[in-house]
Image: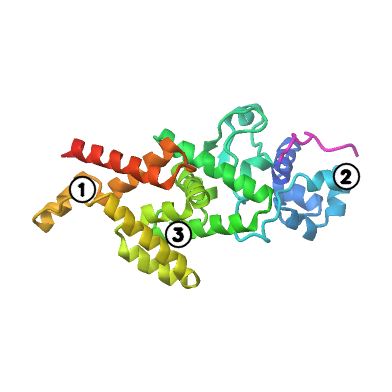
Amino acid sequence: MGRLSPPPVSDELLSSWIGRLAKANYCSVEELCGYLGLGQGRELDCAGDLRVANSAKLCRAVQRPTDEIAAMTLPDTMHHDLQYVSRHDFQYCPGCVDKTPDLVLRHWRLAWSMTCETCGQAFVAKYPAEKVSDRLLALGARGAQALKTAVATNDLRRLRRIDLSLHVMTVLGVGHLGSLNSRNQRERLMGLAAVNVGTARPLLGSAIILRGNDRVVRELRRAFPQRRRVVERIKGLSRNLDRRLPELCATRHQTEQETQAMRHPSASESALQAARQAISELGPDANRQALVTRADAIWRCSSRVKS
C-alpha cells in the first residue's frame, strides 16, 4: 500500500491531516482512526496524546517516520501552570484556508501567534470584534511577544508573573484564565494586554486597575493570601495615584450619580483610560514619574472636555 494522500502541509497539526485524509479517502474520521489504530475518533493534538496511542501502528499505516509524526503534534504544557497551547481552534488564516480547506497549522493554536507564519496574513478570530482600537492591538502584540519569549527561554519567574496577572484579571472580572486562547477577539486581546502590563510594569499596572476600588483589594487578599505584601504595596501605590489623579466632584444626589455613571465613565475608569494612553504613548519602559505626569495631563484634558 502506498502512502495515504494528500500529504501533510508544512507545520500541519496531526488531527488536521487525519481529517483531510478521511475526507479525501471518502470515509469518516472515526473509520480512519480505527484503521490507524487510534480508537474511536481519537485526535492526537499534543505530544502526550501520541505517547499513549499505538504510534507504531500509526506510523506503519501512513508510512511515515515517528519523528515526522511527532513533529505534527503540539508541545505539552503540563510543566507550566500557564496554558498557552489551545485544544480548540480559536483563530485561523483566511488565505491558507482558502487554498486548503479544513487546514489547521500547529502555530495557529499557540496563544502568542497573531499572524500566519506561512503567508504572513493576520489571523481572524472565530468571533472577531466589530471594532478594536489600535492601542489594544499594540498592547496585545507586546503581550504576545512577552509570552513567546518567556516560553522560549523557559523563564519560570516571568511565566509565574504572567499566570498571576491572569489570576488578577479573573478576580477583577475583566477576563479569565482561558482568555489567551479565547475565540472572542476582544477577550483574547485583553488577556494579552494584561500579560504586557504584568511583565512590563506589574505593580504600576495593577495599581492603575485597583485605584479607588477597596472591594477588589479585599478580594485579592482573599484570593492570594500568600502575596499579601505585594497586594499592600500595590494598594499603597494606588493611593499615590489617587493624590496625583484626583476624583471628579461628586454629584449631590445618588440618582444623579447613577445617571452620570450611565452617561460617562467613572473617575477610576477615566484615570485608567488616561494611564493606558500614557503607557501607549511613552512605552511600558518609560520612567514611572513621566507616566504619572502624562496620565495626569491626559486625565485633566478629558475632564475639561466632558465638563
Please report whichever mark, 3 or 2, sits nearer to the chain's N-terminal start. 2
Please report whichever mark, 3 or 1, sits nearer to the chain's N-terminal start. 3
Does the segment drawn in magenta span residue 83? no
Circle 2 or circle 1, nearest the eye:
1
Q: Is residue 16 above or below residue 232?
A: above
Q: Is residue 238 left or right of residue 101?
A: left
**Residue in view at x 78 percent, y 45 percent:** 71
Marks 3/2: CA distance? 45 Å
- Which residue in the structure is indicated by mark 1? 262
- Which residue in the structure is indicated by mark 3? 168
Please report whichever mark, 2 or 1, sits nearer to the chain's N-terminal start. 2
Residue 20 picture quarter: top right
Q: From where the camera sits, is residue 128 visible?
A: no
- What amino acid type is highlighted by mark number 3? Val
- Which residue in the structure is indicated by mark 2? 65
Marks 3/1: CA distance? 26 Å
Location of residue 46 in the rendering, given as x and y in whole percent from the top left corner: 71, 53
Q: Quadrant of the N terminus?
A: top right
- Tell me the element at label 1: helix
Q: Residues within 10 Å of mark 1 (few under 14, many from 20)?
A: few
Q: From where the camera sits, is residue 119 visible?
A: yes
- Tell me the element at label 3: helix
Specify the segment rendered in magenta.
1-12
Location of residue 118 in the rendering, given as x and y in whole percent from the top left corner: 67, 30
- What amino acid type is highlighted by mark number 2? Pro
Q: Residues within 10 Å of mark 2 (few under 14, many from 20)?
A: few
